[in-house]
């Protein structure tokens, strides 16, 4: 079922004043869904869904404002079509959108890692540019575009300045990269935080909407499906902790041993060096947390032991 007056199009769904453009290639996570609001002080959110279609929009009309839900390059791959516009994002991700150097610092503390290399290559390939942020957002802000009000919810964890947006008149909550994918949550950046991510998921449970939508996946969720999938998504964090503790209960192990056992990504996916690296980065965050709450410790050979 679609919200009031929305219709299917070749690119996504739309009504006169609000359009959702589904991401091409979303399984590769190179692109993400785009939201476009027409009218006075119009707004494009995460211009990255579809190169040809968004290029066509940019060629035919002026969109005065661009909002990025967070700093990740797959959400701002086509910002450069609107480089004349004013840019908005949460203030904590603003430095990484304003500067590629800062972006790379947020991404990974090792500039030679496969991930840092991938971000540099992707940025070059997609012509991702630095954009000065004209309006820094914070939790509770209301953005008006055309006749539509959007409410900002700060939902950090995936990145420090990740937001969700409630499209007030249609009761649609856009949760961006709290994306409910079957791979589970992603928190491999240096600036990602498991505790913040969990708090953000908890917060989303209290925001009432009639429809829910993420950045990756071509569908609107009804509330019941959304809560079910959100809980499954949240469980990944706890299940990963449990599996680590069970694994270390057998034998002390290194970070590489734990990663190779398929706790974050299963064996087939680990053949992709980027996924294997994400696995290491996310596992390291679990291990740090488990050390902090005295469940495990690390010895001088970098092996983890259960306490
Ligand atoms: Zn992201």
Image (cartoon, helix red, strand yellow):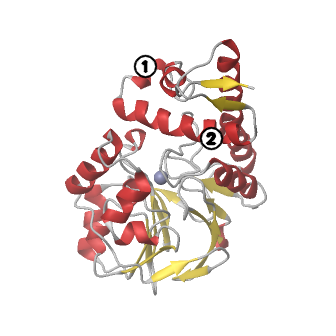
Q: Position of residue 30 (x, y in %)?
A: 35, 47
Q: Earlier in the sequence, mark 1 or mark 2?
A: 1
| Residue 100 placement: quadrant | bottom left
Q: Which residue is more in the foreground, 159 or 152? A: 159
77 vs 249, left or right, is left
Q: Which residue is more in the foreground, 150 or 2? A: 150
Residue at 37%, 22% in the rendered image: 271
Residue at 52%, 69% in the rendered image: 92
Looking at the image, do the residues carrying marks 1 and 2 touch, with CB atoms under 8 Å apart?
no
Q: Quadrant of the C terminus?
A: top right
Local packing at callout 1 (Cα closer than 10 Å; few below 14, some 14-19, many 20+) is few
Report if residue 292 is visible in the image. yes
Task: Work out how far the residue at label 1 is from the one at label 2, CA to CA, in angstroms.
Answer: 26 Å
273 vs 33, left or right, is left
Residue 212: assigned label: none
* Ligand 1 within 8 Å, label 2 CB: no
Report if residue 181 is visible in the image. no
Q: Which residue is under mark 2?
A: 288
The tally of labels here is 2
Q: Position of residue 19 (x, y in %)?
A: 47, 65
| Residue 12 placement: quadrant | bottom left
Residue 268: assigned label: 1
Q: Position of residue 34 (x, y in %)?
A: 43, 60
Which of discs 1 and 2 lies nearer the camera? The answer is 2
Q: Which residue is more in the foreground, 116 or 20? A: 116
181 vs 305, left or right, is left
Q: Position of residue 144 (x, y in %)?
A: 56, 83
| Residue 53 placement: quadrant | bottom left
Which residue of the protein is positioned furthest toward the top in this rendering? 250
Q: Secondary structure at mark 1?
A: helix
Position of 99 relative to 132 (above/below): above
Q: Secondary structure at mark 2?
A: helix
């Amino acid at each position: 079922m679609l919200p009031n007056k929305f219709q299917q199009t070749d690119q996504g769904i739309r009504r006169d004043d609000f359009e959702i453009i589904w991401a091409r290639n979303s399984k590769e996570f190179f692109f993400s869904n785009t939201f476009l609001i027409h009218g006075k002080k119009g707004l494009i959110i995460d211009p990255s869904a579809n190169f040809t279609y968004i290029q066509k929009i940019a060629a035919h009309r002026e969109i005065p404002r661009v909002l990025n839900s967070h700093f990740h390059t797959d959400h701002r791959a086509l910002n450069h079509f609107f480089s004349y516009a004013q840019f908005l994002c949460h203030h904590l991700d603003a430095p990484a959108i304003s500067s590629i150097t800062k972006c790379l610092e947020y991404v990974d503390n090792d500039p030679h890692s496969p991930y840092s290399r991938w971000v540099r290559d992707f940025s070059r390939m997609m012509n991702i540019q630095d954009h000065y942020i004209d309006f820094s957002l914070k939790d509770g802000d209301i953005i008006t575009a055309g006749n539509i009000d959007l409410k900002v919810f700060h939902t950090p964890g995936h990145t420090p300045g990740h937001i969700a947006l409630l499209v007030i008149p249609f009761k649609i909550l856009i949760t961006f990269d709290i994306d409910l994918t079957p791979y589970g949550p992603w928190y491999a950046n240096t600036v990602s935080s498991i505790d913040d991510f969990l708090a953000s998921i908890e917060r989303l449970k209290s925001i009432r909407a009639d429809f829910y939508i993420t950045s990756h996946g071509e569908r609107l969720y009804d509330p019941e499906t959304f809560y079910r999938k959100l809980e499954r998504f949240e469980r990944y964090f706890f299940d990963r902790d449990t599996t680590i503790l069970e694994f270390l209960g057998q034998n002390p192990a290194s970070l590489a041993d734990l990663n190779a056992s398929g706790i974050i990504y299963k064996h087939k996916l680990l053949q992709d060096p980027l996924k294997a690296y994400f696995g290491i980065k996310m596992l390291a965050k679990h291990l740090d947390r488990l050390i902090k709450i005295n469940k495990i410790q690390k010895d001088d050979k970098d092996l983890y032991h259960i306490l």
